[in-house]
Amino acid sequence: MRKSYLFALPMAIGLFGCNQQAPTPESKPADSATTSQSTPAPESANDLPVDAPVVHVAMTGIDEPFTFKDEKGSLTGLEYDIMQAVANSQGLKVDPIIVSPNNLLSGLDTQSYDLVIAVMGYTDERASKYGVSKPYFSSPSAIMHIKPELTINSYKDLAGMNVVVGGGSFHEKDLKAMGTAKSVEALDSTYLMFQGMVQGKYDAIIQDQTMLQYTATKYPDVKTTISPYYADEKEGNDDVVMIMHKDNTELLEKINQGIDEIKANGKLDEISQKWLNAPAPK
């Protein structure tokens, strides 16, 4: 499963260098708190009755584009919208609770909240301990480049190129073992990867598809090509799930029904299109 990277967008001039004109990012995230706190959902989130059941949902609030705070300090993001849509379809109100990433599951263990949504992948270990929803999203690795003359769909297509990969991923080890790429560098920031590619330092990026798609939406003047890449089963399961208490079978059933509904009625694709300019991965 992916390693989560906080996506920061410095001044656009840093992307292209002092002598090049840079497109301006469409938005800039506000600083976000990392301590636990409850944040009210926007009034437009749903039109449910005042006495509708409430589900208390833990999220990081600092992981753009999944859950983060906008310029006004309101929670927003891809997963935030998905959670609201799933809950709304089942007549549930969402009480979002910002929790430090390191404490998400421990807070669930102490029943501080009902559910966690935080780009968590399915594992057998999690399924044995917690209630695990159906997948609501998928984020495989992908390869991004900006040179129209290139065709890159796999490792072998990276021969002779300068490549940058996500820190902590298996791609660095595998590419270095192959020995065909000109250079392989690992970074923890998708922005810095993208910046280096635009400046000519890298020919290609290997990173989670969701992060690359979101980066591309921030700089629409940069024409990118993104190709999903599945490295057999080394990366494990790319499906993203919600985690809740093992014995809360009623909530699990409602969440699964909600996931099915937003997939069937097109709401999930609508949310994905809003944040990634692409339909949800199938």
Image (cartoon, helix red, strand yellow):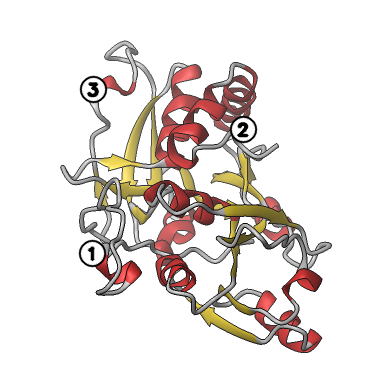
Position of residue 197 in the picture relative to residue 150 (left or right): left
Q: Could you say where residue 81 lies in the image, as x and y percent from the top left?
A: 42, 33
Position of residue 148 in the picture relative to residue 211 (left or right): right
Disc 2 target residue = 249
Amino acid residing under circle 3: Glu
Pointers 3 and 2 in contact (CB under 8 A)?
Answer: no
Q: Is residue 170 visible?
A: no
Compared to residue 6, the image places residue 203 above or below, namely below
Amino acid residing under circle 1: Met
| Number of other residues with Cα within 10 Å of mark 3, as a class: few under 14, some 14 to 19, many 20 or more | few
- Which badge, 1 or 2, comes first in the chain's sequence? 1
Q: Could you give the CA–CA distance between mark 1 and mark 3, rounded to whole angstroms?
A: 32 Å
Q: Could you say where residue 11 lies in the image, as x and y percent from the top left?
A: 23, 64
Position of residue 109 in the picture relative to residue 252 (left or right): left
Disc 1 target residue = 11
Q: Could you say where residue 188 lies in the image, as x and y percent from the top left?
A: 47, 74
Q: Secondary structure at mark 2?
A: helix
| Along the viewing direction, whichever of 181 and 10 lies nearer the viewer | 181
**Circle 1 or circle 3, nearest the eye:** 1
Quadrant (top left/top right/bottom left/bottom right) for the C terminus:
top right
The label shown at residue 43 is 3
Q: Could you give the CA–CA distance between mark 3 and mark 2, rounded to whole angstroms?
A: 29 Å
Position of residue 249 in the picture relative to residue 35 (left or right): right
Quadrant (top left/top right/bottom left/bottom right) for the N terminus:
bottom right
- Which badge, 1 or 3, comes first in the chain's sequence? 1
Q: Could you give the CA–CA distance between mark 1 and mark 2, rounded to whole angstroms?
A: 47 Å
Compared to residue 168, the image places residue 250 above or below, namely above
| Along the viewing direction, whichever of 52 and 276 lies nearer the viewer | 276
**Circle 1 or circle 2, nearest the eye:** 1
